[in-house]
Image: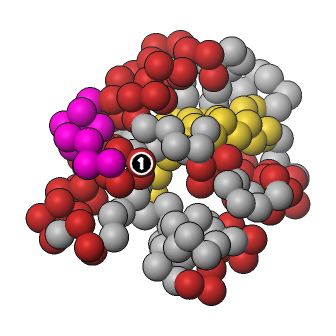
Amino acid sequence: ALSAWSQESDREVRNILVFGDSLTAGYGVDYEQSYPNLMQGLIDKDGLSYKVIPSGVSGETSAGGLRRIAWAMRMPIDVFVLALGGNDGLRGIDLENTRSNLIQIAEKVRAKNPNVRIVIAGMQMPPNLGAHYTDAFAAVYPNVAQELNAFIIPFLLEGVGGMADLNLPDGIHPNPEGHKRV
């Protein structure tokens, strides 16, 4: 899908901004092992003219992302991957606040880059937070994607979350092999 779409641009290289938290920042691994850098490697391997711009801040909440989004968009953005909200869930932040912040972030990106393709990277909470909360949390992402008419990655850590052999000892952040899977 990226290769056909990339031919529509008059710019030589298109930008993919991956906007997230410690997962995007590659917490606990070398930058070369982080999923945004590995994405760039796959794009280069396929000969596509995209530049992945990682913008991850460890501990970032959706409210923090809303405060810093203008700074992160200093160049044209063609694809915007919104990978925030996990820290909101871990802190028990009201889900309506998270939903509202994610929508406002995407709307700010779209206002500055009207033709941007938005991708919502979903997150899930561990079951120890209770079924009601974990179900309500997981539902935020598809609802946001639908409201924004955006693409959705249902769970960014699919096949990685909860797998001890794919995570650092903290059980939250992927190790190098986990980042390859992401």
Residue 79: percent from the left, percent from the top?
60, 36
The kind of residue tagged 1 is Asn
Q: Which residues are magenta?
A: 91-100
Q: Main secondary structure of the magenta part?
A: helix
**Helix, strand or loop at mark 1:** helix
User: Residue at point 23% right, 66% down?
Assistant: 129
Residue 120 to residue 158: above or below: above
The answer to whether 10 appears left or right of 23 in the picture is right
Residue for badge 1: 87
Number of numbered markers: 1
Q: Vertical placement of 18 versus 133: above or below? A: above
Residue 156 located left or right of residue 87: right
Query: Residue 111: horizontal and vertical position, in percent?
Result: 46, 14
96, above or below 136, in the image: above
Identify which residue is drawn at 21% across, 43% down: 95
Question: Residue 135 placed where, x, y %?
Answer: 19, 64
**How many residues crowd mark 1 within 10 Å: few (<14), some (14–19), many (20+)?**
some
Residue at 34% across / 38% down in the picture? 149
User: Residue 38, can we see it?
Assistant: no
In this view, the residue farthest toward the left is 132
